[in-house]
Amino acid sequence: MEHRKSARETTSDTVTGDIEPFPWLPVLEMGNEEIDRDHREAVEEGNHLIRLLNARDSWAETVEMLRRSRDRSTRHFANEDKILKRAGYPGADAHRRAHRRILVELNAIIAELEIVTDPQPHHWERAHAPRNLLVDHCLHDDLKFKSHLEHVGQARRGPGRVGPNRK
Ligand SMILES: [Fe+2]
Ligand SMILES: [Fe+2]
């Protein structure tokens, strides 16, 4: 135990973890202020979680962070679903279902981890799963609506307001 801890406690900010923080990239801008703000927050939160996971020294804080991330995702998904519907995104229903599936998985992972009192290496590994799910969703599913939102945004800003029909 002591050996592992001393190997990970190097300098104040840079712990010797296996996972690097995820940088915010311009390609992640979706063309909607609210969604972009939420995603930036999620990236910051994910990076905080990575620091906890790399350090492996506070399980309670890690589980609390996973709960916070689940709660934030719940709010973000509801907001994103509303925006996609309003923007007439053709994949809005499928996207809403993907959000629902992720929340079910997040809840299952948290339920599994919050009863752990003496975390073993496989528990720390498992605690990476929520972030992986969210990053995967953002890179594979969210990026699919980017061009739609950009098109709608341009149409609304343009002189003729020729956007898709709004309900
Ligand atoms: Fe999404
Ligand atoms: Fe999103």
Image (tube, rainbow, N blue to C red):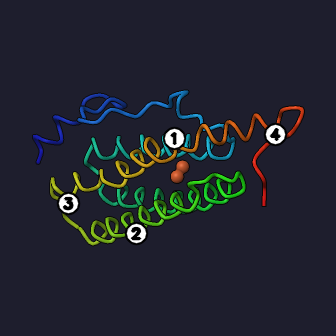
Disc ID at residue 156: 4
Residue at 36% of width from left, 60% of height from top?
63
Which residue is the extreme one toward the right? 159
Q: Nearer the viewer, residue 77 or 51?
A: 77
Q: Regarding mark 1 in the picture, which secondary structure is present there?
A: helix
Residue at 53% of width from left, 34% of height from top?
28
Amino acid beneath label 3:
Pro
Identify the residue under disc 3: 119
Identify the residue under disc 1: 143
The answer to which of marks 4 and 1 sits earlier in the sequence is 1
Q: Marks 4 and 2: which is nearer the front? A: 4
Q: Nearer the viewer, residue 148 or 44?
A: 148
Q: CA distance from mark 2 to mark 1?
A: 22 Å
Query: On screen, 108 above or below 21?
Result: below
Amino acid beneath label 1:
Leu
Query: On screen, 33 above or below 11?
Result: below
The answer to which of marks 3 and 4 sits earlier in the sequence is 3
Q: Marks 3 and 4: which is nearer the front? A: 4
Amino acid beneath label 4:
Arg
* Number of marks present in the image shown: 4
Check whether the beta carbons of the residues at disc 2 and disc 1 lie within 8 A of each other: no
